[in-house]
Amino acid sequence: MLTKPRNGWTTFSLDGTSKYELSYLDDIAFEWLDQAIHGLETMLPFCVKGFLEPSRFLCTVSFWNCHVVIENDERLPLTGNDVKNEYSHTSMLEFCRFLYDDISLDIDGWASFKDYCEDDPEEKKQRLSQKLARLNELIATRTEWFGEDRCFL
């Protein structure tokens, strides 16, 4: 879903979507983990975002699907040509597993993804590890909620 960060960029893609280059202007690992944790804690859809420079990337993660929206970042009213929509049959649980796996593969890289801030790199790695542990815990406890006989109201 996310490639290892490289020079302040990562590539996002899900089954059925295009590839999108997301920049360091958003601290992807921390912001997306917070959203995923909240989504699994509350069992409510959530949204992650990124900056494509110059467009804005949004991915709404619902129970059974993800909806990607690419929109012009200008402050003008949007027209049909300013918005791109794509869908992936990726469940919330699958999205969270992908996120956990991708960030776990390169904690050092993700901790320094947004490297223009003053945060201590070791402290960022520790916070990132704590968020990953919480997400992994939630994935384990919510797996049964995503069986074929489950539905959300």
Image (spheres, helix red, strand yellow):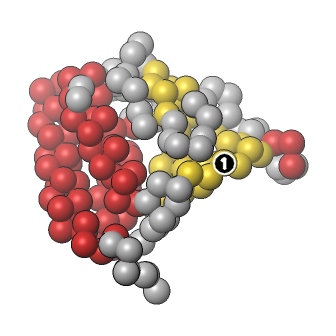
Q: For residue 5, what is the image quadrant?
A: top left
Disc 1 element: strand
Quarter of the image where the N terminus is located: top left
Q: Residue at x 21, y 35 (%)?
A: 104
In the displayed structure, would residue 123 be above or below residue 132? above
Identity of the residue furthest to the top in this view: 7
Q: Can you give x and y, in whole percent of width and height, for residue 121 in the image?
A: 18, 24
Q: Residue at x 39, y 16 (%)?
A: 6
Along the viewing direction, whichever of 64 and 29 lies nearer the viewer: 64
**In the rendered image, is residue 141 in sight?**
yes
Q: Residue at x 46, y 21 (%)?
A: 9
Q: Can you give x and y, in whole percent of width and height, for residue 35 in the image?
A: 38, 55
Q: Amino acid at mark 1?
A: Glu
Q: For residue 72, what is the image quadrant?
A: top right
Q: How many marks?
A: 1
Along the viewing direction, whichever of 122 and 93 lies nearer the viewer: 93
Q: Is residue 81 left or right of residue 55?
A: right
**In the rendered image, is residue 38 in sight?**
no
In the displayed structure, would residue 8 be above or below residue 49? above
Q: Can you give x and y, in whole percent of width and height, for residue 70 in the image?
A: 67, 42
Q: Is residue 119 left or right of residue 44?
A: left
10 Å crowding of disc 1: few (<14), some (14-19), many (20+): some
Identity of the residue furthest to the bottom in this view: 153
Q: For residue 84, what is the image quadrant?
A: top right
In the displayed structure, would residue 128 be above or below residue 39? above
Q: Residue at x 48, y 49 (%)?
A: 48
Mark 1 — residue?
86
Q: Can you give x and y, in whole percent of width and height, for residue 109 in the image?
A: 27, 22
Q: Is residue 77 left or right of residue 37?
A: right
Identity of the residue furthest to the front in this view: 148
